[in-house]
């Protein structure tokens, strides 16, 4: 049984767990180790529930606590070659990461303790940012957070996945009417920042397929979005799909919390779908 959990999802910190009863991975290290361990224990998990970490990019809300994770866990950290060089250039307080970093094969699947992982590059203003396609016991999972615009490659992986975690960062009206400086607003919305609710919904429309079972909306902005706005925007697309194909089951749609852990979700085929109004 494949299980998924978000420990935090937003500019304050990002960290996700994916695994089964005998293997797992953690994606990003943007929460403190104390919060990380407490959240795992509350979900009935432990440090033995996963064998490696994956890093999506080198912004602090994704790697702020990587050094402590390496020191305490002593587990491999998988990155791309380019991202590894960027991490090497960072001035960590102590050199606790270099000995644990491993390079993912480019344009191919990587076997990480029985979990198959492949990365794809997405546009975002970090040194390099990637999404991950994961196959765990044959179950296909895709995560793409901090993605300035959708790419054909990302769509191709999402079209094969049973679960997709996708950024739905901001509502355009809230962003434009909000307090951010003009330069920051442009940085967010011009293709190398973040994905809006409308762009996320359009992406779902493009990768929607009958085998898709779960969609998790991640990295919602604290100041420029609300969970209800993000949910309603993407749910409208699922409603369209249900109208066009009423015999097909629609995916379960959820917004991941920004600052607190989500439940430990079991990604199984018999879970109830969202009721449609």
Image (cartoon, rainbow, N blue to C red):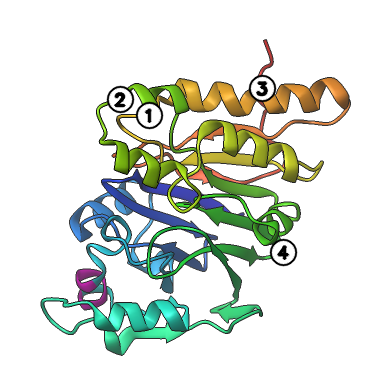
Residue 273: mark in rendering: none
Residue 236: mark in rendering: 3
Earlier along the polypeptide chain: callout 1 or callout 3?
1
Residue 175: mark in rendering: 1
Contact (Cβ within 8 Å) of mark 3 with mark 4 = no
Along the line of sight, which residue is nearer the eye, 44 or 84?
A: 84
Q: Where is residue 235 in the image (x, y as percent from the top left)?
A: 63, 25
Which residue is tagged 4?
138
Is residue 275 shown in magenta? no
Q: Marks 2 and 1, Cα distance to the nearest angstrom? A: 5 Å
Q: In this view, does 60 lie to the left or right of 277?
A: left
Q: Where is residue 216 in the image (x, y as percent from the top left)?
A: 54, 40
Contact (Cβ within 8 Å) of mark 2 with mark 1 = yes
Classify 10 Å Cα crowding around label 2: few (below 14), some (14-19), many (20 and above).
few
**Residue in view at x 57 percent, y 31 percent:** 198
**Residue 269 is drawn in which quadrant?**
top right
Q: Is mark 2 on a helix, strand or loop?
A: loop
Q: In this view, does 234 lie to the left or right of 221?
A: right
Earlier along the polypeptide chain: callout 2 or callout 3?
2
Classify 10 Å Cα crowding around label 4: few (below 14), some (14-19), many (20 and above).
few
Residue found at the far front of this picture: 182
**Residue in view at x 31 percent, y 61 percent:** 59
Q: Marks 4 and 2, Cα distance to the nearest angstrom? A: 44 Å
Above or below for 110 versus 262: below
Earlier along the polypeptide chain: callout 4 or callout 2?
4
Which residue is tagged 2?
178
Q: Position of residue 156 (x, y in %)?
A: 73, 58
Quarter of the figure that contains the C terminus: top right
Q: Marks 3 and 4, Cα distance to the nearest angstrom? A: 30 Å
Q: Marks 2 and 3, Cα distance to the nearest angstrom? A: 25 Å
Above or below for 101 versus 117: below
Q: Which of marks 1 and 4 is in front?
A: 1
């Amino acid at each position: 049984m494949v299980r998924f959990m978000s420990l935090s999802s937003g500019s304050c910190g990002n960290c996700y767990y994916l695994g089964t009863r005998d293997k797992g991975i953690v994606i990003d290290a943007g929460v403190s180790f104390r919060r990380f361990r407490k959240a795992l224990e509350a979900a009935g998990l432990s440090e033995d529930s996963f064998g490696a970490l994956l890093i999506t990019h080198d912004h602090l809300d994704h790697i702020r606590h990587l050094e402590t994770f390496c020191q305490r866990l002593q587990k491999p950290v998988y990155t791309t070659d380019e991202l590894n060089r960027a991490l090497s250039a960072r001035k960590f307080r102590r050199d606790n990461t270099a000995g644990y970093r491993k390079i993912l094969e480019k344009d191919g699947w990587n076997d990480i303790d029985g979990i198959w992982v492949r990365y794809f590059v997405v546009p975002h203003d970090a040194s390099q940012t990637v999404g991950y396609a994961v196959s765990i016991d044959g179950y296909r999972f895709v995560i793409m957070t901090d993605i300035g615009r959708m790419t054909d490659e990302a769509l191709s992986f999402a079209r094969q996945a049973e679960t997709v975690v996708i950024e739905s960062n901001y509502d355009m009206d809230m962003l434009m009417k909000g307090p951010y400086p003009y330069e920051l607003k442009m940085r967010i919305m011009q293709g190398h920042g973040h994905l809006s609710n409308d762009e996320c919904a359009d992406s779902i429309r493009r990768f929607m397929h009958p085998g898709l079972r779960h969609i998790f909306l991640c990295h919602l902005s604290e100041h420029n979005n609300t969970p209800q706005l993000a949910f309603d925007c993407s749910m409208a697309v699922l409603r369209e799909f249900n109208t066009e194909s009423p015999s097909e089951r629609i995916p379960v749609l959820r917004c991941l919390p920004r600052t607190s852990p989500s439940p430990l979700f079991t990604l199984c085929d018999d879970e109830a779908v969202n009721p449609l109004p």
